[in-house]
């Protein structure tokens, strides 16, 4: 069945579509408990991993707006983007947490901070998510609602937050999937970061198709070619 088929695979870990739906609903209930409301921003500073996809879907389920930030930037540059977005919650990968925790404490806004792979109980994403049920009443939305906020690179000035609407996704993703001929039996290698529209769009398109998403940490051609062969990849989008 579709619910038992693998949704995302990352190294030795995998999660089915049913498990992903359940996990993202726990995230959604956790976000509501933290006071997140529709249109609120929720930031993610992380490489592609299963947790960031759970969070992406959980944010969407409560009508909030995911803000994926470029983890290649310096802590000071990320702080500037956070000050602009003013998220209610910030999800971090451990490798970026230490550099950003001091910065976050100096912001003019207050955000709850959760760390995907933290060993600290009070910051642990896994512990936090585990406190909540997977039963969820979905919120209604409108076509003009913001689906995601991504920032430009800032090469010509200050980075700008581009707000992508749900109508834009609803119209473009099916067209792209049809053009790419993505199906439920496809295997889509995702190496582009989700703070880039090509990375986020490929991820959403693959999940919309009920294809299998394969995450790879490889950035060199040799590693990407090895991943294509080992995972029997059918689709890859590069920029």
Image (cartoon, helix red, strand yellow):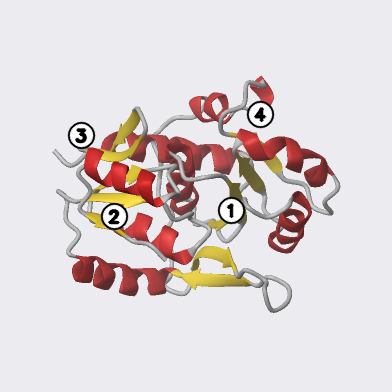
Decide which of tag 2 and tag 1 comes sooner along the chain: 1
Q: Nearer the viewer, residue 5 or 47?
A: 47
Tags 2 and 1 touching, CB below 8 Å: no
Tags 2 and 4 touching, CB below 8 Å: no
Q: Nearer the viewer, residue 144 or 178?
A: 178
Q: Secondary structure at mark 4?
A: helix
Gap in angstroms between the C-alphas marked 2 and 4: 31 Å
Q: Nearer the viewer, residue 148 or 186?
A: 186
Decide which of tag 1 and tag 4 comes sooner along the chain: 1
Gap in angstroms between the C-alphas marked 4 and 3: 30 Å
Decide which of tag 4 and tag 3 comes sooner along the chain: 3
Q: Nearer the viewer, mark 2 or mark 4?
A: 2
Q: State the residue position of label 4.
A: 123
Gap in angstroms between the C-alphas marked 2 and 1: 27 Å
Q: Position of residue 71 (x, y in %)?
A: 62, 50
| 58 vs 159: above or below | above
Quick one: label 4, few (<14), some, or many (20+) residues within 10 Å? some
Q: State the residue position of label 1.
A: 37
């Amino acid at each position: 069945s579709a619910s038992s088929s693998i949704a995302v695979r990352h190294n030795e870990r995998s999660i089915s579509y049913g498990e992903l739906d359940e996990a993202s609903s726990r995230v959604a209930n956790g976000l509501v408990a933290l006071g997140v409301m529709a249109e609120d921003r929720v930031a993610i500073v992380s490489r592609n991993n299963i947790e960031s996809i759970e969070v992406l879907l959980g944010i969407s389920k409560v009508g909030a707006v995911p803000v994926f930030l470029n983890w290649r930037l310096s802590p000071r540059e990320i702080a500037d983007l956070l000050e602009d977005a003013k998220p209610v919650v910030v999800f971090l990968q451990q490798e970026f947490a230490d550099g950003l925790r001091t910065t976050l404490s100096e912001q003019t806004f207050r955000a709850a901070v959760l760390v995907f792979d933290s060993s600290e109980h009070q910051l642990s994403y896994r512990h936090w998510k585990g406190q909540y049920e997977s039963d969820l009443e979905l919120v209604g939305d409108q076509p003009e609602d913001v689906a995601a906020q991504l920032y430009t690179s800032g090469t010509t000035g200050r980075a700008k937050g581009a707000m992508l609407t749900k109508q834009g996704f609803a119209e473009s993703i099916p067209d792209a999937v049809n053009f790419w001929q993505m199906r439920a039996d496809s295997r889509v290698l995702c190496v582009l970061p989700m703070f880039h529209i090509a990375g986020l769009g490929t991820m959403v398109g693959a999940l919309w198709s009920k294809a299998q998403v394969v995450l790879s940490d490889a950035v060199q051609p040799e590693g990407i070619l090895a991943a294509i062969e080992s995972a029997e990849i059918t689709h890859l989008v590069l920029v």
